Image: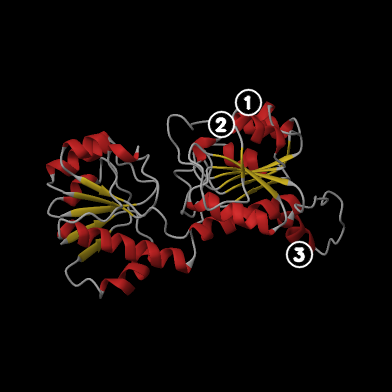
Amino acid sequence: MKILFYDTKGYDETSFEKRREEFPEIEIDYLKPELAPNTAKLAKGYDAVCAFVNCDVGTETVEILHQCQVGLILLRCAGFNNVDIERANNYGIRVMRVPGYSPEAVAEHAMALALSANRRIHKAYVRVRENDFSLGGMLGFNFYKKTAGIVGTGKIGAAMARICNGFGMHVIAFDKYHNPDLEFVEYVEMEELLAKSDLISLHCPLTDETYHLIRRETIQKMKDGVILVNTSRGGLVKTEDLIEGIRARKFFAAGLDVYEEEKKNVFEDRSDEILESSITARLLSFPNVVITSHQGFFTEEALASISETTLENAMAYMRRKKSGNEVDGSNM
């Protein structure tokens, strides 16, 4: 089985090559460019392609992959909002993902962002490097006995809920489906979560229903001085309204691992370039905002899990078996 990997970094290739010896039936070629309509034709002669979170696997790409007789789209990520699932299913192209590579990795990063933004760790680091040991503008607040609002209690949201519970926080959550393993969590409606939470952490997928979940109307319902953390998808938050809320001092702090218009930036070194959008610069201009580069997943354990599950998905396809990681209409 021949697989063409797109949007490959050195750490991806290293991780997959460590485990490929266990799968001698699989042959892999690695490309740096992302999967998109203009690169999809390179998949001619391959049985499958493997894409990451920012690849464009929309209608045009899927049609070209079909013309190239590709039978499988492997996603080495959990999200699939960038894939035209219906068109792929219509062409008989199977789509398989990695639904839970390391929930704890993302949840731990979410709490790291919350703590860093709250206690201004990013500012303190820069100050002390300049021999400035003053504390002005560094005042935070205890998480202990405060209320954490978790939006989405799947594997990652559940891991974040457990971390917050360990900090001695009262944990409330909103999700259509209540997680029976979270006995300490109080499920509430979204409006109540917005009004009561001192910390709001987003852990839900990006769908038509959740697009711009955080916008002017929902921000106005939040408690003054709230901390917002997003390690899920940038489109959950309407950036212009977030900036408006930060300027109005609605937010005590914000920690973002994902944000709108990140596509050209994420995982790339653009330090020598002038960025086309000012959104990142505008967010970074605020002393109470911490931004990282979509690195919540980036741990050794997570990379190992991604590699293993992706290759197991490929083997399931070869053997015409179900893996449980298929994406079709029932997942959407």
Q: Position of residue 229 (x, y in %)?
A: 62, 45
The relative height of residue 247 versus residue 167 in the rendered view (above or below) is above
Q: Secondary structure at mark 1?
A: helix
User: Which three-letter amino acid code belongs to the residue tagged 3?
Assistant: Arg
Marks 3, 2: nearer the viewer: 2
Which numbered dot is residue 216? 1
Element type at marker 2?
Answer: loop
The three-letter amino acid code for the residue at tag 1 is Arg
Question: Which one is nearer the viewer's eye here, 280 or 252?
Answer: 252
Identify the mark at residue 55; answer none if there is no mark. none
Q: Residue at x 16, y 49 (%)?
A: 71
Mark 3 → mark 1, Cα distance in angstroms: 37 Å
Identify the residue at image location x=22%, y=39%: 88
The residue identified by callout 2 is 238
Q: Which residue is mark 3?
A: 129
Instruction: Please say if 12 is above or below 93.
Output: below
Q: Are marks 1 and 2 in contact (CB under 8 Å)?
A: yes
Residue 190 visible in rendering:
yes
Q: From the image, which quarter does the C terminus lie in? A: top left
Residue 108 at x, y percent in the picture: 58, 59
Q: Residues within 10 Å of mark 3 (few under 14, many from 20)?
A: few
Task: Give the distance between the C-alpha atoms of the residues marked 3 and 2, in whole angstroms.
Answer: 34 Å
Query: Label 1 to label 2, Cα distance in Å?
Result: 8 Å
